[in-house]
Amino acid sequence: MELARVRTKICGVTRPEDAVAASRAGADALGLVFYNKSPRSVTLERAQEIAAVVPAFVTLVGLFVNPSRMDVEMALSRIPLDLLQFHGDETPEFCTQFRRRWIKAVRVRDAAVVTDAFDRYREASGLLVDAYDPSRYGGTGQSFDWSVIPRQRPLPLILAGGLNSANVATAIGQVRPWGVDVSGGVESPDGTADGTRKGIKDVSKITEFLSEVNRVNQTD
Ligand SMILES: O=C(O)c1ccccc1NCC(=O)[C@H](O)[C@H](O)COP(=O)(O)O
């Protein structure tokens, strides 16, 4: 697919003010994590507060990890989600049942994981490739070997995993993704060794990240 410009998603938003700041800074999409084992998990009440401040033309994405059908239906009945993101071991049949566009996330151990996913999840609106961590489904802050991502892509490819303003231009140059997704790389530092206050976004980091993507978009 010919790339118009690289789209951006800020994931793991937990506060309305961060949703406003990311939208104003130019993010194309915002992700809400409905997975209660994540430190970035939001309640439906909090998700409603965030959804209420998301402006027109910014895509609101609901992220799930191995949810029940009821979990997804409950979220859809209360939150105006534009897109679903399945980040666990959901089958294609599970993902397609909601009459809502969806993307599938996979954790990349090797190239076969990506080619298999392209083959399996043909009805997805995109495939998100993230770092592999045996103990976590996502939001790891780790990047992975981008060279294993195949060039042949039947679906739009969204690159995630350990992105930040320092590496996103290189990542785009190497991978040529449809979009990029970031969470930990735009969070506030918390002074600990691994880093960030999970779910608390840093406006200046979001702005730097989006500026880098814009810079690449304008030079391509
Ligand atoms: O963010 C989480 O805590 C999370 C937990 C479980 C599944 C997925 C999760 N996040 C998914 C995302 O879309 C993240 O943006 C993506 O994994 C990249 O995260 P990061 O490496 O921190 O940028």
Image (tube, rainbow, N blue to C red):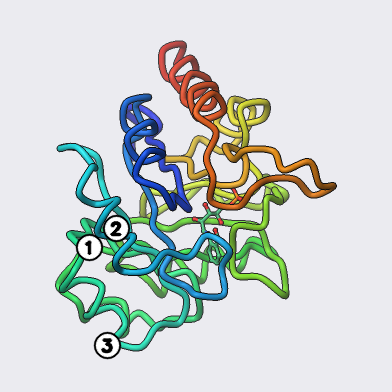
Q: Hey, which quadrant is residue 76 in on the image?
A: bottom left
In the rendering, at what x and y percent does residue 122 appear? 33, 68
- Residue carrying label 2: 125
Quadrant holding ligand 1?
bottom right
Q: In this view, does 112 lie to the left or right of 180?
A: right
- CB under 8 Å between discs 2 and 1: yes
Q: What kind of residue is marked 2?
A: Ser
Task: Give the SS element for disc 3.
Answer: helix
Viewer-closest of 17 and 62: 17
Q: Tell me which label, 2 or 1, sits earlier in the chain.
A: 1
Badge number at residue 70: 3
Nearer the observer: mark 3 or 2; the answer is 3
For label 2, being within 8 Å of ligand 1 is answered no
In the rendering, at what x and y percent does residue 86 appear? 41, 70
Q: What kind of residue is marked 3?
A: Met
At 36% across and 56% down in the image, what residue appears?
126
